[in-house]
Image: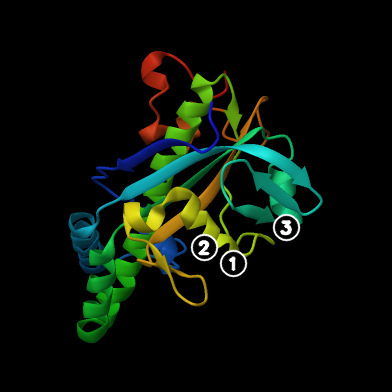
Amino acid sequence: MAAGLRIARESYDIASVDRREVLRYLGYRDQRLSDELGERIDAVVGRCLLLARPRASIADYPVASVDAGEVRLDGCTLRLTGADIVGHLHDATRVALFAVTLGADIDRELRRLSLTDALEQVIFDAAATALVERAADAANARIRAYAADLGMFTSWRFSPGYGDLPLSVQTDFLAALDATRQLGITLTPSDLMVPTKSVTAVVGIHPDPQPGLEGSCSICSLAEFCTLRTTGRTCRG
């Protein structure tokens, strides 16, 4: 395959968010939830789902070299630096990059709620965080299916800001995905993304199965978005 092969620009129709995930982002730890608060959370989640436009840009690049402290990709200027990402991608032959976003309407609603209802702002923020992670799962599932079609396997996703992979890679990361034009994602001077409910991540594509991934489709976090099972296959080969 050619360097810099674009896999997809995708939109995701995500109809629900697990209330347990929203509660986790709110800091709940098995406390009793009143019916009134539960209904309020569900209503806020519903509004978040209506306003969100989950979209992704996904690209695949061959690994050009892995040196001490840096992974270079063939076909783009992105350099993935740090011992953690080098260890994560140590035997990858290709790297998939993705960016997902919920869109600007989510940020506008967060700003509105900051002026009108502090509690709903907190709930809405947690709901949006849970939703963008679901969108990241959908993009991740797409990459796993792509790797399986190549007879290869993926590692778990690794985002700038994890470990010692610095946020300063975000400029070249977004450029490698054409994410500003495709998705409207820009960066602040401190390399934070706008819209704020956006995620970027690296997924290694490897010749052999990788340890640490889910051993069963029944517990896989990507199962809802998996297209492999409909063909009778799994990402484990």
- Where is residue 50, by image quadrant? bottom left
Q: Residue at x 24, y 72 (%)?
A: 108
For this view, does 217 lie left or right of residue 158? Answer: left
- Give above or below for 232 relative to 212: above
Q: Residue at x 23, y 60 (%)?
A: 48
Q: Residue at x 73, y 48 (%)?
A: 86
Q: Residue furthest bottom?
A: 115
- Give above or below for 147 relative to 230: below
Give the x, y percent position of residue 92. Answer: 67, 35
Give the x, y percent position of residue 204. Answer: 61, 38
Q: Is 210 in front, or is 223?
A: 210
Give the x, y percent position of residue 16. Answer: 26, 47
Do tag 3 and tag 2 residues touch (Cβ < 8 Å)?
no
Give the x, y percent position of residue 179. Answer: 40, 54
Describe the element under mark 1 as helix, strand or loop: helix
Tell me how far mark 3 sits from mark 2, CA to CA: 17 Å
- Bin the neighbour count of mark 1 within 10 Å (Cα to Cα): few under 14, some 14-19, many 20 and up: some
Do tag 2 and tag 1 residues touch (Cβ < 8 Å)?
yes
**Which residue carries the number 1 mark?**
168
Can you tell which mark lies on residue 82? 3
Mark 3: which amino acid? Answer: Gly
Mark 1: which amino acid? Answer: Ser
The numbered mark, 3 or 2, whose residue comes first in the sequence reads 3
Describe the element under mark 3 as helix, strand or loop: loop
- Where is residue 19, by image quadrant? bottom left
**Residue 19 in view:** no
- Bin the neighbour count of mark 2 within 10 Å (Cα to Cα): few under 14, some 14-19, many 20 and up: some
Q: Nearer the viewer, mark 3 or mark 2?
A: 2
Tell me how far mark 2 sits from mark 1, CA to CA: 7 Å
Mark 2: which amino acid? Answer: Thr
**Which residue carries the number 2 mark?**
171
- Give above or below for 90 relative to 146: below
